[in-house]
Image: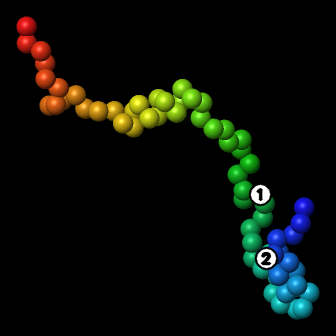
Amino acid sequence: MSKSKAKKQRLHAVRNGKFDVDLKRGTQAEISTHVRKTKTKKEKLDQLRSKHKKSTSGWRIEKVA
């Protein structure tokens, strides 16, 4: 893979005696490595159903027999 423009600039600065900003960055261990997964269709529908649940108190007219 190619280097990004920012990385090229950082490496150039280090070669020319500037401070290496990579030293101030955290280690890779701080990154969460647990598996992320997208929700299934059923999980997404359940989320939307509970998010947009309408209250039935007050607006619903009961049919009187």
Residue 48 lies left or right of residue 9; in this view the side is left
Residue at screen point 44% across, 35% down: 48
Residue 12 in the image: above or below residue 44: below
Which residue does the image show at 34% across and 33% down from the upper left?
Answer: 53
- The mark found on residue 2 in the picture is none
Q: Find residue 13 and report its horizontal and vertical position in percent.
A: 85, 87
Closer to the observer: label 2 or label 1?
Answer: 2
Where on the picture, by quarter, is residue 16?
bottom right
Horizontal and vertical percent position of residue 23: 80, 76
Query: Can you identify the residue that label 1 sits on?
Result: 29
Give how far apart the Cα atoms at labels 2 and 1 are. Answer: 23 Å
From this view, report whether residue 39 is shown above or below residue 10.
above
Q: State whether residue 56 is above or below residue 26.
A: above
Q: Residue at x 7, y 7 (%)?
A: 65
Question: Horizontally, is 25 left or right of 45 in the view?
Answer: right
61 or 16: which is nearer to us?
Answer: 61
Q: Residues within 10 Å of mark 2 (few under 14, many from 20)?
A: few
Q: Which mark is residue 6?
A: 2
Furthest-left residue in view? Answer: 65
Q: How many numbered marks appear?
A: 2
Q: Position of residue 15 (x, y in %)?
A: 92, 87
Q: Residue drawn at (46%, 34%), measured in percent from left and top?
A: 47
Q: Is residue 19 above or below residue 7?
A: below
Label 2 SS: helix
The kind of residue tagged 2 is Ala
